[in-house]
Amino acid sequence: MGGDHGLVVTVPASLDCLKGNPDLTLILVGDEVLLKQHLAQALLDYQGRLSIHHASQCVGMDESPSKALKNKKDSSMRVAINLVRDGAADACVSAGNTGALMATARFVLKMIPGVDRPAIVSTLPSIYGHTHALDLGANVDCTAEHLFQFAIMGNELVKAIEQIEHPKVGLLNIGEEEVKGNEQVKAAAKLLENSSLNYIGYVEGDSLTAGSVKVDLIVADGFVGNVALKSIEGAAKMMGFALKEAFGKNPLTRLAALAAYPVLKAFKKRIDPRRYNGASFLGLRGLVIKSHGGADVLAFKTAIQLAEVEVKNDVIKKVSEQIQLILAQRESV
Amino acid sequence: MGGDHGLVVTVPASLDCLKGNPDLTLILVGDEVLLKQHLAQALLDYQGRLSIHHASQCVGMDESPSKALKNKKDSSMRVAINLVRDGAADACVSAGNTGALMATARFVLKMIPGVDRPAIVSTLPSIYGHTHALDLGANVDCTAEHLFQFAIMGNELVKAIEQIEHPKVGLLNIGEEEVKGNEQVKAAAKLLENSSLNYIGYVEGDSLTAGSVKVDLIVADGFVGNVALKSIEGAAKMMGFALKEAFGKNPLTRLAALAAYPVLKAFKKRIDPRRYNGASFLGLRGLVIKSHGGADVLAFKTAIQLAEVEVKNDVIKKVSEQIQLILAQRESV
C-alpha cells in the first residue's frame, strides 16, 4: 500500500518480478478489496506463488513512527513485518514511511543480540561500478562501537551479495590524514584496524562515487551518511538539469540532442537511481527492505530483487553469526 | 608559492586579474628569485600595481599545521597573512595547505571578539544559480552556538557579496520534520528561529545544489559540511565520467559527441568547479581566501576575484559589526 503511488506501482512491480523469477513467491499485504481489483487475472496466472494477506490499516507517509506503532497495529507494514517474524515470509519490502517502518521492524523483529543499533545500508553508483554505504539515516549520534558494528554488519552483507571475500571497508572522514576527524571516527578507526576486516582507512565524501581507489563499503553515522546520500542525489539532479538546459537552449542544441539521444539514454541508464533503489535495515532478526517512497515500477522491482538476493544469500543469518563471533572473541580476550 | 602547481598557476592568474581590473594591486609573496624569473616584463607593465614581497620558506601541502606554525615563520603564507594583519594588504589568497593556512590565519589575525570558531564558507552551483555553505571543514564538532554564529557570519557575507537584503538561511539536517536531527542542530534551530535572520528551517543535502526551494546560505558543522561538499564533487566527477564513457563508446557515439560538442562544452562550463573556486575563512579579523590546491589558472583567478569582491563589499567589517550587535543585544536582555 505504501509509497507515494501505492498499488499502481507495487502491483505491476510485483507481477514483473513473479514473471522474471519462477522461484519467487509474493504475499501482497494490504486492503484485500483493492488488491483483488488490481490483481484480477494475476491471482490465477500465478496461483501458488501470489497471495493476498489482508491488512485493514495504512501508515501515512508523514505519520509519526510512535503513533504508527501505537495506533496502526493492523497496518500493511506491521502485518508484513509480522509475517517475517512468524517465518511466513523471508523478507518484507515496503515503500512506506521510513521512520515508521524502522520503528515497527525494530519493535516486531527485535535486534540481533549484541547489536546496539540498526543501520540502513544501500548502494550508490560509482566510477568503479557501485559502493555500499551505511548508516544512511537510522542513527543521528553514533559511538565508535556503533560505527564498528555497522562495519561488521555491512561487511557481511557485501560479502554475501557481491560474492567477494574481503570487501574494502572505508571510514567516512573529512581528510585521509590520521589527525583529522571527530573523536568517534578516530576511535572507530582503532577498532577497525584491530579487526579482521579489510579496513583501508579514512575516505572522503567523493569516495562514495568517484574516489581515487575502489571502496566496497563506506561507514558513517546516520547523520553524515544521510547528508552525503542526499547531497549526491542533489548533485546528480543538478547536473541532469544543467544537461537538459544546455540541450534545450535553441533549435540547434535540440538538434544536437536528437543526434546524441541514444548516448544520453545510455548515460541516463548508467546512473539511473531506480537501478539502485532499495535500502536494507541491518541489525534486525529479519529482513526488511525499504524502497524509495517515490519509486516507480522499475525502482520498486529493484527493491524486490534486492530482497531476493539477500534472502538467497542468507544475509541476516550471516550478519547474526558474525556479530556473535566477534562478541565471543571479545569475551575470550 | 602554494598549491599543487605553484607559480605556473599563481603568476599567470595574478597577471590576468591585473589586466582585467585596473583598480587591483597585487603583492606576490614568496621566493624573490623565482618570482622575478616568472614575472619578468610584467613588473614593468604593471608598475605600481604589482610587487614582490620576499618570503624564504614554503609550507608543504602535507605539513602539519602545528609544525608549519612553529617552524615556518618566514613562509609565504605566514608573510602574506602578516601583510593583512599590518594593513599592507586587504586580503590574502592562497592555494596552500588548508590546515596550516587556517592555523596561521587564526594565530596571526586573531578571532573577531565574540566569535568562538572560524568557519570556511564557499559557493556551490545549484539549479537556482548557486548556494553558499559553511562550515566546510574548519570544525569537526560544533555546538548550537557555533552553528548560530556561522549563520550570522555567513548571512553577512551573502548579503554583502550577493547584494540581497534577507538571504534565505537553512540548517542542514537529515529531514525537514521538527523531530529529526541531532541535539546541536535542534538547539541551533531554536536560536535561528528567535533571530533576525530569514531562517527558513531545516534543509536536506540535496538543497545544496537542487532542493525544492532556493536557499542562499546553508549552515552545518565542518564535518557534515565537508562530507557534503566532497560528496557533491564526487557525484559530479562520476557523472562526468559516465557521460564521457557513454560518448566514447564506439565510432557512432563519438560522432554524436562531435554533434553535441558545443552543447557539452556549455554544460561543462555551467557546472565548472573552477568557476566556484575560493573559500573564505570567516570569523577572523582579516580576509583570507583559500583556493583549491589543484587550482589551474582560471580557478586561481576566480579565488583572487572573490577576494576583490569581499574587499570591495567590506565583508570582514560587516561580519564583525553584526557579531558585536548580536552580542550587545544579548547582554541587554
Image (tube, coloured by chain):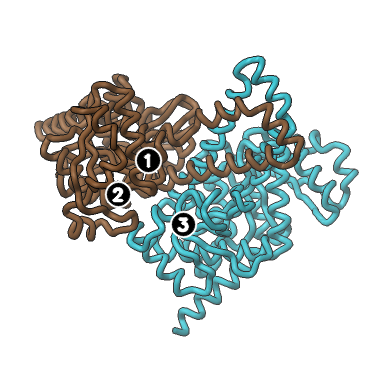
Chain colours: A brown, B cyan
- Residue receiving disc 2: A139
- Residue receiving disc 3: B203
Asked if B329 appears above or below A125 in the picture, the reply is below
Label 2 and label 3: CA atoms lie apart by: 18 Å
Q: Label 3: how many residues lie within 10 Å, few (<14), some (14-19) or many (20+)?
A: many
Q: Mark 1 lies on which chain?
A: A
**Measuring 62% from the left and 34% from the top, which residue is drawn there?**
B4
Instruction: Describe the element under mark 2 as helix, strand or loop.
Output: loop
Instruction: Describe the element under mark 3 as helix, strand or loop.
Output: strand
Label 1 and label 2: CA atoms lie apart by: 29 Å
Quadrant position of the C terminus of chain A in the picture: top left
**Residue type (three-letter) at the residue carrying disc 2:** Asn
Considering depth in this image, is B4 or B165 the residue closer to the camera? B165
**Residue type (three-letter) at the residue carrying disc 1:** Val
Q: Decide if residue B317 is on the left or right side of residue B102.
A: right
Q: Which of marks 1 and 2 is in front?
A: 1
**Measuring 62% from the left and 61% from the top, which residue is drawn there?**
B158
Q: Which chain carries label 3?
A: B
- Residue receiving disc 1: A9
Label 1 and label 3: CA atoms lie apart by: 28 Å
Q: Label 1: how many residues lie within 10 Å, few (<14), some (14-19) or many (20+)?
A: many
Q: Decide if residue B311 is on the left or right side of residue A99.
A: right
Query: Which label sits on residue B112?
Result: none
Q: Where is residue A65 in the image (x, y as percent from the top left)?
A: 26, 56
Q: Decide if residue A120 is on the left or right side of residue B281.
A: left
Of pointers 1 and 2, the one earlier in the residue sequence: 1
Q: Decide if residue B276 is on the left or right side of residue A92.
A: right
Q: Label 2: how many residues lie within 10 Å, few (<14), some (14-19) or many (20+)?
A: many
**Measuring 51% from the left and 63% from the top, which residue is drawn there?**
B151
